[in-house]
Amino acid sequence: MKKLCLESNENGSSLIITGDVDSIFSNRRAARYLKDTVRFAKTDDSIVVEADDDINKSIDRIKKLCEYIGADLVFSGRVSEAVTNYALEEEKFGEFAEKARLIRDNQCDKEDFERFVDSVSINLSNRSLYELQLLSAYHLAFSQNACNFSVPGAGKTSVVYGAFAFLSNLPQDDKKYVDRLLIISPLSAFGPWELEYEECFGEKPSTKRLNGKVSIEEKKQYLYSLNPAKITLLSYASVPSLKEELIYFLRNNRVMVVLDEAHKIKNTSGGVTAVGVLEIAAYCSSRVVLTGTPAPNGYEDLYNLYKFIWPTKKIIPFEVYQLKDMSKAENDPRVDTLLRSIEPFFIRVKKSDLGIPQATEHEPIVVPMGETQRRIYDVIEKKYMSDIVSSKDDWFRQDLVKARLLRMMQAATNPNLLSVPLKNFASFEGFDSDAVAEDASLISDVLQYAKLETPAKFVKARELIEGIIASGGKVVVWAIYIKNILDFEKYLLSCGIPCKTLYGATPVATGEEDEDEVETREKIIAEFHKPDSSFKVIIANPFAVSESISLHKACHNAIYMERSFNAAHFIQSKDRIHRYGLKPGTETNYYYLLSEESIDEVIHNRLIEKETRLRDIIESMPIPLFENAGLETGDDDIKALIAEYVNRTKKM
């Protein structure tokens, strides 16, 4: 068998090929490939190749030469660290990839799996993983580098800790041994990762949050320290500025790196965050990708995820432009090839696999508006819908219409929301307090609304809350607009109902704030979970609380004060209280408040359609593709709104 031997200079800028190099030049395809793809110089018995910035690409090309001439590639002892890493990855890939495929196909060694289960049961002392979690943790532990695309609420964090419990208790000379975790995630996930560790292991871990409260110099010093914490938590935005320090940290520790909400690195167009994360990938001892939405826009969103877990391998056999084409075309035959290529390296648990008790979807509660609110809404709806119905301009529909829909949604719940931007509202939306009596009356009603009446939805929501609390329950109230959250909080407090709010401005714990002075999300959620909590109601915004927060252990009731056309946020909010871990017989209740004869009814019907379509995709496709699911406000929503308005006004 022919051989090509690879060595390099110290910094890896040049690669030297020795061995059967003459065979390259005697093979027409190999010789042409060499000349077309690399810069090189030939000596009597070697070829010196100028390495690319990404040395992995250069080595891949040399491997291609081996294929052309039927030769094995061997690595000399005289190679740079980058080449050594490549060689180690080659060795690991062959072993771990095959094992991952067998585990995923449920063909794993039963004795081996039993040893894994025994180890996890001993070392993950405070948590029993269910069967699919154990299989997922086993798949991760033995593949070392894997994606978990399970739905929200499937317990992906527990799976990671199960694998870590096994790997961190291997002998230190085992090549799979790890002793540290680096979690790269949204800031809001820091607290849940720490809390979940305590719940899994029965003890608090040593952790370090490298967040905005820590200076860049302090972050660098920590990453250079000799004894870093067991768990380091870092936001995606911090990675680019700490790249060199992170590489040092990963080189000098045996680190499992977890990308939580990993779709944040989907950008394949050179985004600094994605590039920064990919540049540290080669130095991780183990790589984990977690996301319930692996391809929200198209198959191209998978590209960086697989580039991260195996940076030296081309798992996905297509380029980004090809993946984009595949996303647009129905039944593209290349999709089967894509799935076969990536399936050994991902696990996906669907919601139907979890055995969660069915939730109760109560019939919408249609709430008649108060007299003043009705006047305000009717004037706004008449003007806007007349313009929308008569417009033939696509630009008008795509941009201005969405802004006007927001106004109608605000008026349908609480016209007081219109008073904040009233000057802009009056001038830009065509209402003139001096010219038209109807407009002047509208502006007066908006300005005086808070004094004239309480929004009818507030009253109905309060009645529901009182009933839930009286029966010993707790409730989360979902609202879109910040002022609505604050106004409703003020209303409940005035009625003697203690409550707390969770939205963008609610601070995330840094670990350094004064215990008594700062009320963080973590403190609010921890208090809410106590059986004797001082409040039974949380008012939350789905945009800010859609990731990494679980309320299902304490709360089984959700009231939707208002909703947008965004189906993704709606489903994510529902999953906050309907997740794995609910006890058999637990009843989860969803209540929807709709203002009578308003945009609310169209939103409700459109969300039912979108949710049904989205759930079907999630349950039926190994990689859910949401490209055409219509999650945001689109033409079909506007058409439905027009149809409803025309039918309703014809009856008047």
Image (cartoon, rainbow, N blue to C red):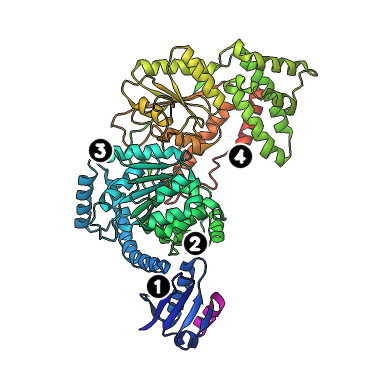
Q: Name the amino acid type tagged 1.
A: Val
- Foreground disc of the pair 4, 3: 3
Residue 385's x, y, as percent? 69, 28
- Marks 3, 1: nearer the viewer: 1
Magenta region: 28-39
**Which part of the image, by quadrant, shows the N terminus?**
bottom left
Q: Position of residue 638 (x, y in %)?
A: 63, 35
Looking at the picture, how far across and down is residue 522, in whole percent? 40, 31
In the figure, is residue 102 to the left or right of 385?
A: left
Secondary structure state at the residue bearing disc 3: loop
Residue 302 visible? The answer is no
Does the stretch in magenta take in 36?
yes
* Marked residue nearer the N-terminal end (2 or 4): 2
Q: Residues within 10 Å of mark 2 (few under 14, many from 20)?
A: few
Q: Would you name the residue on which mark 4 appears?
A: 634
The secondary element bearing badge 2 is classed as helix
Q: Earlier in the sequence, mark 1 or mark 2?
A: 1
**Which residue position is annotated with label 1?**
79
| Residue 189 image-quadrant placement | top left
